[in-house]
Image (tube, helix red, strand yellow):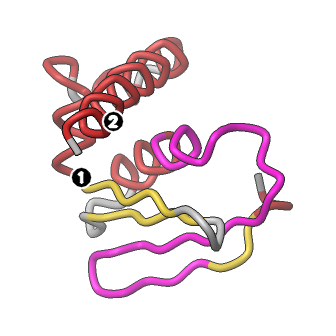
Amino acid sequence: MREHLEAIDIDGRTLRVSVREPLEVELHVLALATALRVFERYPVFDELTLGDGVTETRLTRQEIERLLGADGWGAIRERGRWRQTLARIVQTYSVAMRGEEGVR
């Protein structure tokens, strides 16, 4: 990931991360994984924006907490559940995004 990192900017309680292509995963997947780590480790941040110069994904702490559901941050803190939790969140987020596209 570090080789793809272009810039990091802090604006109040928002962390903005710029990355460069080609990425090994889809931008929204990287944004979700980054948001999970950032929000879990740094409670001062309430919003993450990750972009590649063309596309941008904006996530809030509230959205991530909703995606975590009843398991909450405990699911992220348990090393053995990290991948499973991320996969579930990516799936839920992707379904929600497809639903929003259908409404437009």
Element on which disc 1 rests: helix
Q: Which residues are magenta?
A: 8-32
Q: Is residue 36 toward the left or the right of residue 92 in the image?
A: right
| Residue 48 forms part of the magenta stretch | no
> Which residue is nearer to you in this view: 81 or 35?
35
Q: Residues within 10 Å of mark 1 (few under 14, many from 20)?
A: some
User: Which corner quadrant holds the C terminus?
Assistant: top left
Please tell me which of labels 1 and 2 falls first in the chain.
1
Q: Is residue 60 toward the left or the right of residue 79 in the image?
A: left
Residue assigned mark 2 = 97
Q: Nearer the viewer, mark 1 or mark 2?
A: 2
Residue 48, given in percent of the width and then of the height, sits at 39, 63
Residue 7, given in percent of the width and then of the height, sits at 66, 79
Rendered position, 92 above or below 60: above
| Residue 11 forms part of the magenta stretch | yes
Hey, which quadrant is residue 59 in on the image? bottom left
Q: Residues within 10 Å of mark 2 (few under 14, many from 20)?
A: few
Hey, which quadrant is residue 68 in on the image? top left
Residue assigned mark 1 = 61
Query: Residue at point 34% right, 23% down?
Result: 95
> Which residue is nearer to you in this view: 24 or 38?
24
> Residue 90: which numbered mark, if any?
none
Residue 29, given in percent of the width and then of the height, sits at 54, 38
Q: Amino acid at mark 1?
A: Arg
